[in-house]
Amino acid sequence: MKDKKPILMIRCAVYTRKSTEEGLDQEFNSMDAQREACEAFVASQKQEGWVLVPDRYDDPGFSGGNLERPALKRLLEHIESGRINCLVTYKIDRLSRSLMDFAKLVEIFDRHGVTFVSVTQSFNTTSSMGRLTLNVLLSFAQYEREITAERIRDKYAASRRKGIWMGGRAPLGYDARERRLVVNDQEAEQVRHVFRRFLEVGSATLLVRELAEHGIRSKSSTAADGALSPGRPLDKGTLYKILNNRTYLGEVVFQGEIYPGEHEAIIDKPLWDRVHSILAGNRHTRANATRAQTPAPLKGLIHCGHCGRAMRPSHTRKQGTLYRYYVCMNASKNSYRDCPIGGMAAGDIEKLVLRQVQSMVGSPEMTARVWKEAQKTEEPFEERDLVGALHRLETVWDDLFPGEQARLLHLLVRRAVVHTDEVEVHLRVSGLNLLAAEIGTEEDNREER
């Protein structure tokens, strides 16, 4: 009589998942039903050596659209360590609703010799037919998920067109309650104050400073974990968002179209129109400013040494005279009292940078580095010619057009940092030899003329 072939033990893990936490507080919920069916299936295969592992792999409240699930990650770690031979789920989409993600999981299963079984769909991945059936079913699961997403988007769009508040952070002046915006009387009065004062002041910069002094801040919020995020002082960007938010008119904007909202208006139309006439006038003034005619050779290079922000070029005209400045972005956005650098005369800064460049270029160390780099070119020149050409930079500078000054500075300077008592310049060594050659060529042409 022949001995029976020993039955190999197959260690089985059950994975359950539910997209939402709704109903999980019940004594017997849907995840319990999934587990019960899977455990019964494993018990029915006891004669084949199937044994249930003691670990539980449950992901309540996690979507099947991605693999970022704690129990699934722990399951994959146990598969890779060889603790599991078979994975059992109630349905395929409990494991994944994404065909791409499922293909990655099947690859891991194959690599570690793990069989995948779906209890209600009666197949496993050890056969080619099982794989085909699996991919077909998963394709339909993904199709169903995409159709559901389209329905949600369509419902969202229809609700927005009806003026229904669809969630998100409520703007200053409102509170969100039961998917509706309800007027917060205290904040609403602050919003009205902002509109009225902008009408009187006419300057966002001055108004931001005034609002900070009166303690008017952006809306505070409470996170899901109960942590309070206090409001912040209004800057010019936030101020413009408030002044352009049509929610305050009792309207809803969706995909560029305006619809009547279900909420109460805070600002009346005459006040809104007067404020926006000022905003439109300011935009018109700014648009007419001919920036191309205003030279700013340090644009993109100069930074504030106090806060690290870039300094943008600015200008004004008084009695026909043009005055140019470089202004710290932090000071421009908030208040000049927030930054000791603030705004500085452009001509003074450009001269300081140029002198600093000349000082650095004239040092023996820098000259040696530039001359060494110049020797790698096709037409290297003598060191004395290099020194002489670079030292003539200041003489040539005033004869150059603003665009050429900007080009040369961008060739020379990598970054310029303005402090209250000095200007810190970082040079581009690779561009110095090219600049020296250009200056030298220009000087030769002048002598020939």
Image: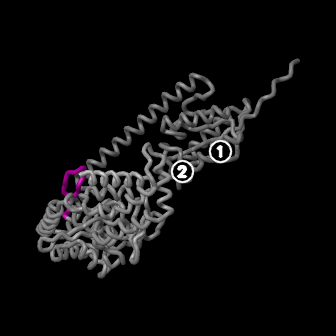
Nearer the camera: disc 1 or disc 2: 1
Q: Position of 173 compared to 80: left or right?
A: left
Q: Is residue 107 visible?
A: yes
Find numbered disc 1 in the image and state the secondary structure of the residue it sits on: helix
Residue 85, image x, y percentages: 69, 36
Main secondary-structure element of the magenta-colored stretch: strand
Write the residue at 51% across / 49% down. 62
Find numbered disc 2 in the image and state the secondary structure of the residue it sits on: strand
396 part of magenta stretch? no
Instruction: Please report the bounds of the magenta region as a residue range.
Output: 249-260
Write the residue at 47% across / 65% down. 363
Q: Amino acid at mark 1?
A: Glu
The reply to whether the C-beta atoms of the residues labelled 1 and 2 are less than 8 Å apart is no
Q: Quadrant of residue 144?
A: top left
Report which residue position mark 1 lands on: 77
Residue 314, image x, y percentages: 25, 67
Q: How is the image coloured?
A: one colour
Please tell me whether residue 121 is drawn above or below residue 291 in the rendered image. Answer: above
Front-most of residues 440 and 426: 440
